[in-house]
Image: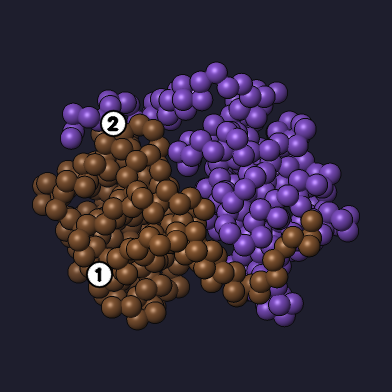
Chain colours: A brown, B purple
Amino acid sequence: MTEKLEQVLPENIEKRSFEIISQELGERSFDPLEEPVIKRCIHTSADFDYADTLVFSPGAVRRALEAVRSGALIVTDTNMGKAGVNKKVLASFGGEAVCFMADPDVAKAAKEEGTTRAVASMKKAAALAEETDRPLILAVGNAPTALVEICALLDQGKIDPALVIGVPVGFVNVVAAKEMLLEKDVPSIVARGRKGGSNIAAAICNAILYMARDGVE
Amino acid sequence: MTEKLEQVLPENIEKRSFEIISQELGERSFDPLEEPVIKRCIHTSADFDYADTLVFSPGAVRRALEAVRSGALIVTDTNMGKAGVNKKVLASFGGEAVCFMADPDVAKAAKEEGTTRAVASMKKAAALAEETDRPLILAVGNAPTALVEICALLDQGKIDPALVIGVPVGFVNVVAAKEMLLEKDVPSIVARGRKGGSNIAAAICNAILYMARDGVE
């Protein structure tokens, strides 16, 4: 089988992957700021569905680039999502990624309120955001309940995020929660339908981080 | 939109998700030990392709259950994969999950040998495995080069893993590396084709961990 392996230098594997993705997308054209996000989601999943399902609110990527360059606080709804974010690039702009899902106070609040830890962790993010001037990016790749809570916090005027990444994956309330977010007046990137995941949430963050690093305006 | 949300208690969301997955899989029948693994991959990705692409070597799940119950060492090829593994259940059997990708000695070795950090980290895993009696589970969700290196280590008789999870995702050498692993005489679970990912690698680990916890024989 070894002869079937393509000889590609380690540092060129990603470049070659993106060439293949571009080739298979063929004549399709995308907004130049949205294209790197779409392609990185395909890169991370080998799933071309994302070329059809990703929905960007107007100017969402531009606003997210500004946020990253101002030292954004990225709040994820899983430690897996946080692990996937390129913290080195994020830190180069003074930014930080956090996840509250494993915090004891979040577990306690969720139990007391009969809700999910994802909801409690979004409430904690909102409280934290009030205390800081950092732009807030909420990256939800797992829990639709987190998105529903974000919608409630938006309605109550308790958060003003620079971007909400709404890409939870699954079968219960995932589609409805994403559609709910799409009705809100907030910068958002949403993967319509059931698909998404912590890997997709991280890929979207990283696409924006790499654009910021590479000087994309 | 709120009225479209299904009322499901937080603790029942996963159960309800698996009911929907079973329903949509319809009349398809699977090996009883492989079915929970297949369903958890679908659960984590909302992608039913895994019902067709996952390939199990004979007895792979049974061998993996024994390994977990004997305190397996799970080596992942991304920190994201490690983050996704349920360490609480793993630790309840005396097991541990590690990832060497961010280790300085791995970065150094990769640079010196002109290879990827994934290759260097699999070599480190092999060296570590020689020093321990713990069964070894290699969980590759990202780097096809890691799988190619595992094949070389198998050929050299340098590793004897209880399970190799071969689910890297991508466009360069991913398909070929998986087919190479499938030719080896080693317990394996492979997602044929381009798809996979750190989330899928973690989902396979967790499916086996939960079966071990729930007393499945």
Task: Report crowding for label 1: few under 14, some 14 to 19, many 20 or more residues within 10 A (C-alpha).
Answer: some
Which residue is labeled 1 in the image?
Answer: A62
Asked if one can make out residue B155 in the rendered structure from this viewpoint, the answer is yes
Is B80 drawn above or below residue B107 in the view shown? Answer: above
Subunit that carries the residue with mark 1: A
Q: Residue at x 18, y 55 (%)?
A: A186
Image: A74 above or below B10: below
Q: Position of residue A15 (x, y in %)?
A: 54, 71
**Residue identifier under label 2:** A114
Residue B36 x/y as whole percent: 58, 29
Q: Nearer the viewer, mark 2 or mark 1?
A: 1
Distance, label 2 to label 1, CA atoms, is 38 Å
Please state the horizontal and vertical placement of residue A64, each as a whole percent of the image: 27, 67
Q: Residue at x 70, y 55 (%)?
A: B176
Residue A31 falls left or right of residue A155: right
Name the quarter where the C terminus of chain B is drawn. top right
Give the structural element (helix, strand or loop) at label 1.
Answer: helix
- Residue A65 in which image quadrant: bottom left
Seen at 66% across and 53% down, the residue is: B175
Labels 2 and 1 touching (C-beta < 8 A):
no
